[in-house]
Image: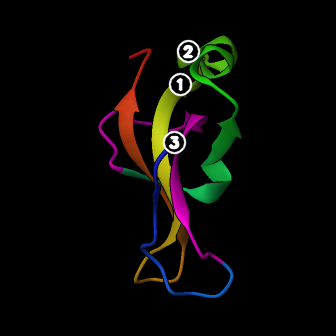
Amino acid sequence: MRSYSLDPHPSISVVKETFAVVRIPRIKRERVPANNVEVVEDLDIAMEKSDPSNHLYAAKVLGPSRSSEGMTLYYILEMYNV
C-alpha cells in the first residue's frame, strides 16, 4: 500500500491507503469520521464484514487525517459493495 504524509500533527504522522469497513448513512460520502471506520487486513475481510442493510460497506480508504475542524477522518477512495 502507498503512504502519504498529509498531516504534520504529531499524533498522526503518515496516512495510508488501506481496506476498511465504513459505516455511513448515505453512499455518496467523500470522508468519514475515524470512529465510523474499521480498518481490516484486506478486501476479502472487508467484504465479509460488510452489511449494506446496516449501512456497513467495504471500501478502500486513505487516512487517518485531521480535518480543519480538528476531527480525525478517513477519505473514501473506492466503495466495493454498493
Percent across and percent down for residue 75 are 41, 52
Left or right of residue 49, residue 72 in this image: left
Q: Which residue is mark 2?
A: 53
Q: Residue at x 52, y 25 (%)?
A: 57
SS at mark 3 in the image: loop
Q: Nearer the viewer, mark 3 or mark 2?
A: 3
Contact, CB < 8 Å: mark 3 with mark 1? no
Mark 1: few, some, or many residues within 10 Å (few <14, many ≥20)?
many
Q: Earlier in the sequence, mark 1 or mark 2?
A: 2
Residue at 59% from the left image edge and 15% from the top image edge:
47
Range of the magenta residues?
Answer: 12-30
Q: Which residue is mark 1?
A: 58
| Quarter placement of the C terminus | top left
Residue for badge 3: 1
Q: Nearer the viewer, mark 3 or mark 1?
A: 3
Mark 1 or 2, closer to the camera: 1
* Residue in the picture at 56% in, 68% down: 14
Residue at left offset 57%, top offset 87%: 9
| Residue 77 at x, y percent in the picture | 35, 41
